[in-house]
Amino acid sequence: MLNWVNFLHIYQPPEQNEHIFHEVARESYFEIAKFFDLYDGLKLTMNLSGSLLEQLIKYQYDTLLDDFRRAFTGGEMELVGSAMYHPILPFLPESEIERQILLDEKIKQEIFGKEYERRGFYIPEMAYSRKVAEVLDEMGFKWIILDEISFNGKLDSFDKEKIYKIKELNLRVIFRDRKVSDYFVPEKIKEISGQIIGKNKNIITATDGELYGHHHQDFYNKTKAAFTDGNIRSLKASDFIEEFGSDDLEEIDPIDSNWESQEEDLENNIPFSYWNVAENEIQKQMWGLAYLVIESVESRRDDDRYDLARRLLDKGLSSCHFWAASGKQSTIWKDTIWNPDVIERGALFLIRSMRSVCEMDVETRIKAEKKFAEIDRLVWDKHWNKFYKV
């Protein structure tokens, strides 16, 4: 029997382009919601990011939300916590990490009720650090899911079927199998099932949920073949941990990393190479602006427009704005990661947050404006000189 934990993360950046949002919802989210009606016994563990839920409400996707709510209350879908606007948590102060988690929790409880509680947690991009684990443990989360490279910086180097415990914390950790997760997962799972007839095996996969329908058209019904295979047993992550865990788990200390980390990056102590690299001047300036805005806005909580400034700041911290400035080759999509409009949108969220505050000294305002102007100059200089193609 193949015991399969299938973890799906679905997310859209704050204020995503409306056409793109509707396209992805139509191609992917409605298809995922149908799975629960089509396949008896199917269990999925999912992160429905707060940013996504906020836009589903905005565009009145009531039927889709009802479908997900029914799957949750019926026990087919396990819902995990995350950070509202998908920031890279290791770079944020503890107070900002907690704020993003609480915002995510608030919208999930508004939609799914008090039955949603703190159990599992998806760290955006599986970007792990000890600081993040300590915050999650303090807030009462029970387990996290990480990429296998987080175990020791190597791929395929340990027992991925086991459940572990973070050293000196109460936080459990399970690891996704990267090799299987990087395929069209149902196709690979079906293949593995055929290879282990009469044997038992556990596999944990984790992917963007948009894999189903949006990124991959399943013309050959591989999903159906996997979801109806009698040798495959789907389990929610918490049920897997309860069934296969124990009170005497091996304690480990995962390394700083993310679910796209490469061994070479970790050997060179670059655990978050898509979002913050010392040689990347745009990312350097973006983080500088972000920290200035956090400090300036948070020191003015009594300001009449604090709530507006905070909403803009929260969205400005989304990982996408820093990722779009990477200029690296994606290990998954094989394209160069570069989008000046997304970078600019992130910088605009941050500077508009600063501009929204009523009481702010001119010196600080000008300092922020100069950072914003420098980001804009760097972005378009790099775009036209390096990335623009006729």
Image (cartoon, rainbow, N blue to C red):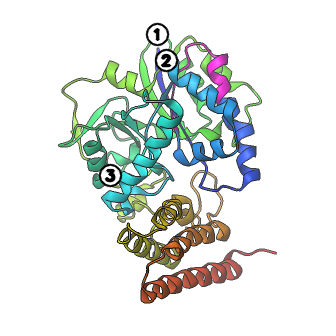
Marks 3 and 1, how far apart in space?
A: 41 Å
User: What's under tag 1, amino acid-wise?
Assistant: Gly
In this picture, is 97 found above or below 216?
A: below
> Which label belongs to residue 198?
1
User: Mark 3: which amino acid?
Assistant: Val
> In the rendered image, which residue does mark 3 sit on?
132
| Residue 162 image position (x, y, % from top left) | 32, 29
Of marks 3 and 1, which one's residue comes earlier in the chain? 3
Say what amino acid the circle numbered 2 marks.
Ile
Q: Secondary structure at mark 1?
A: loop
Would you say 164 lies left or right of 317 here? left
Residue at image mark 2: 196
Q: Is residue 287 left or right of residue 255?
A: right
**Chain part drawn in magenta:** 33-47
Compared with residue 385, is residue 72 higher up or lower down, i.e. above or below? above
- Residue 97 x, y percent position in the rendering: 37, 55
Determine contact: label 2, label 1, CB under 8 Å.
Answer: yes
